[in-house]
Image (tube, coloured by chain):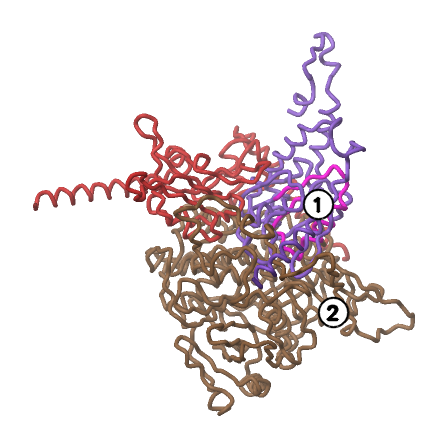
Chain colours: A red, B brown, C purple
Amino acid sequence: MYGKGILKGLSVTWKRFWDTYTEDISWMLRGKKRYNTEEGIRHRSSKDTKGIFTVQYPEEQLIVPEEFRYVPFLVYDEGADGKKEVRCTSCGICAKVCPPQCIWIVRTNDPVTNRPVPVPTDFYIDMDICMNCGFCAEYCPFDAIKMDHDFAIASYERNVYNLNKLLKPASYYAGIRPENYAREEEARKAKEAAKAAKAEAAAATS
Amino acid sequence: MATATQTQTVDLAARFPGMVSADTRPGYTGFIVNKDNLIEVATAVRDEFGFDLMTAVTGVDYIAENKMEVVYHAFKTTGGAGLVFKVQVERVDPIEVPSLINIWPGVDFQEREAWDLYGIKFTGHPDLRRILMWEGFEGHPLRKDWKEPFYEEDVKPYKSRWPEGNHTYAEEKNPYRDNLNFPEGFDPEKFTVDKEEDLYLSLERDTAKDVDGSMKTEHIVVNMGPHHPSTHGVLRVAVTLDGETIIGLKPVMGYLHRNHDKIGERNTYLQIIPYTDRLDYFNSMSNNFGYVTTIEKLMKIQVAERAEYIRVIMAELSRVQNHLIFIGMLMNDLGTMYTPSLYAFEERELVLDIFEAVSGTRMMCNYFRFGGVVRDIPDYVLQKIKDLVFERLPAKTDEMERFLNENEVLVARLKGIHVLNAEDAIKYSVTGPVLRATGVPYDLRRADPYSIYDRFDFDVAVRHNGDMMDNYLIRFDEIRQSLRILEQALKQIPQGPINSQKAAYQVRVPAGEAYGRIESPKGELGFYVVSNGKPNPYRYHVRPASFVNLTAVESMCKGSKIADFVALLAMLDIVMGELDR
Amino acid sequence: MDNEKLSLPNYNIPQDIENVVAITTLDRLYNWGRRSSVWPLMFGLACCAIEMIAAQTARYDMARFGMEVMRPTPRQADMMLVSGTVTKKMLPSIIRLYNQMPEPKYVVAMGACASSGGPFKEGYNVVAGIDKFLPVDVYIPGCPPTPQALIAGMIKLQEKIDKESISKVRWYNKEKFDGNYVPMPLLGPDLIDVRRNTEIRDIAAKKTTQESA
């Protein structure tokens, strides 16, 4: 019969339409909220999603995985008196590994000895060149540069970030990447402990 | 790891003494053919030795030796190792090499590309115009002594970035500010714009003269694109129409030529990986795969066992989503606006969620590293993949088939249209699903197995009519086979390290050359890399599947209707990022 | 939400007719109409175009903002979403499309490439940012911006539209309005920006003297 294929196809579409409402009703009967809740969004992004698929961005947001990366930022630790202790030592590895070469670092030199000091004087990232590859964060030996989760950074101007704009506290980093943060902290503590033990051993032998 | 680098099976030097010599440079393979005997040798390579598929043609500029080299990679459609032969010519203009277009018509675009970017003149090529840049562009950009306007240094990393990287826009250094470079004494007011006469002349020449029918019609030339909703990006085609029938056609490309090769030669080996993501932007995982396999071949390193499985899983997932998008987009071009592609995108989003969870981004994954992958798949993601592969995707593929396959309009638009026969497909170096739809079971995962594909049980999807319908159906077959591979890989995936190498931002690559190729969802994706032992490749060339597959388009669509041509473009599954690079 | 934004511009309505009367300003009504029906030009350049398509599909659904009507013709479009790398070869076509768009028109540079040339900036065939030629309203960083980031950028554009005033917009200003026309660049030995002809000639001439000296 001519037209059978079209009807068959339309039935698939009809089923999708129907699913949206049956799903809504079944959530309602179970007393759960399908929209604007984490559970609802997770369900809509899982294999069981049926019917409506939309996550209504500004009102609700997709739940991004921990590894999600957008643009880089610099991590600082909050010191005892609220001082920002920048983790970056301006070693320049991120600037070297950056594929589009959009990281610019000014290393600090000691005014007296003129020897380099492990703190950046300034740090620029041209966010409009950055290709979000994540190499800087991957190869940074000091866990000082990390990839951000914040993507709503559109602006009316070109985006060249300087040190001030790049800095974000370690607590923020721990918030967006808890697992990575925990792992790195552990590694750092182990390293410090090993260092201390080594120093102790050295002191004992001498 | 499978032995992708098989030893040379053919001894051309013994067959043609005096004309051919083996390439003895350390790390190099293949033969060097005398320029004057090239046609003779190439004919024998095709007819005597049976290398019927000429896949890659590219130039290399050995400026220190004052030589220009053209490298040919020929393969057999029955599978197995390839044959590499080269021609070397003095690097003095005009650089002339005989064209092989009469032996393998598939070299057409690639020879034009070598002319455009290297200035190698292929004598006997009937239509040697620039292909990626425009006519009248100054210089041949890939030559080693050609410098672009924003040139800073030969290789990255640039010294200006650290330790005194006060931010300066590159614009400020360039005299013209805007990435421009004019020859000395150039006067823009006296300049006359190129009217693209060459293009229209060649279109005129290749236009079929005798169109049947007694009514005399006037031929009109129509330019479709570069801004056209159906050309899948910024492709432009100049067509001569007789009524609605196409009688002559020339694709014009380069509207997305992003200088991948030139930038690649400045990057370190590692820095190229994120750039490969942007080749075929639907399948960044496959592109990564092809590139790292090539470099691993050069470095002669093993890949960690678990990483091999992860790679296969990622590559096959990306094939599934690519083919789903293909189906959606084909339907879009046939006029069923939106609905099928919305369904396809739904599944794609779920696959992209997985990519996002393992690699960090949806599209530009940058996930593969030499010797392995960046990070392990978390358990919850592995579960998610299993859910998709074992439950959702098979069901949704079936649903998609139920939705579309018997649709009368679709059948009328696809069945028997644009038939490509196997002989022509091989002649034009077509690879991938388009070739397999003509009945040639040429799939690199079987024909020249790389990675661990030889461990999996799957069939090469083949259809035999070569028309649009088969091209459409073969995508479903391939999705099913990919799911089969995925099921096995997910069951077999072992525990263990995910990288055999230490994480390092500089890798040591010994001098030599390598041609690595994988079966990307679009066809054969090849990478030709020449290393001279430095941290950056000396020559880095991509052999994109879409670009070469497009060679066949001209002969395929002559005599068909213009509306079907739109569908043909969708069928070839071209993607401009890869086509223009 | 929209109702609240639209009504009550510092004017107190007597309580007994509060539910019957609504007061707004002409600006608000005008901008509300425009911001809710920004039709983009169907115009994909590169990788970002795929994310733009993704933003149109079911999961992100830009139709919620009145932006689903992708117009393939510039005559019906309000916004040019420059989604991807602008190459020199492509630029004349883009400028032509822009010139064909009727006012009011907006340009959004989506992604790194359109904003500044991005990772391909150093390439010989890449224009270092569409803002060299067109007035860009919103820059969206990211390579490519995720569909949600794109929507965030679109909201930014809507905010910009909200701030405009019907008495000041350039397209009703008959005396000063020059149509925002951008002269077409030409493809010569390199891209020729005809607005800068003399500058190009001078530098090119200087180049000769420098090299001969």
* Quarter the N terminus of chain B occupies: bottom left
The image's mark for residue B154 is none
Q: Say which chain tag 1 marks.
A: C
Magenta stretch: includes residue C82: yes
Q: Is residue A39 above or below residue B69?
A: above
Image x and y of residue C7, in percent: 69, 19
Residue B45 visible in the shown view: yes
* Residue pictured at 63% horizontal, 40% vertical: C61
Q: Say which chain tag 2 marks.
A: B
Image x and y of residue B168, in percent: 50, 45
Q: Are marks 2 and 1 in contact (CB under 8 Å)?
A: no
Instruction: Say whether residue C20 is left or right of residue B213.
Output: left
How packed is label 2: few (under 14 Cα within 10 Å), some, or many (20 or more)? some
Report how many numbered discs are placed on residues in the image.
2
Q: Is residue B280 above or below residue C110?
A: below
Q: Which secondary structure, mark 1?
A: loop
Name which residue type carries label 2.
Asp
Q: Is residue C141 above or below residue B472?
A: above
Q: Start and end of the magenta stretch?
A: C81-109
Image x and y of residue C28, in percent: 71, 24
* Quarter the C terminus of chain B occupies: bottom right
Quarter of the image for residue B496 reads: bottom left
Q: Which secondary structure, mark 2?
A: helix
Query: Which is more toward the observer, C153 or B519?
Result: C153
Residue B71 visible in the shown view: no
Magenta stretch: includes residue B189: no
Alpha carbons under labels 2 and 1: distance apart: 31 Å
- Same chain letter for marks 2 and 1: no
The image's mark for residue B198 is 2
Image x and y of residue C111, in percent: 57, 46
The residue that disc 1 covers is C41
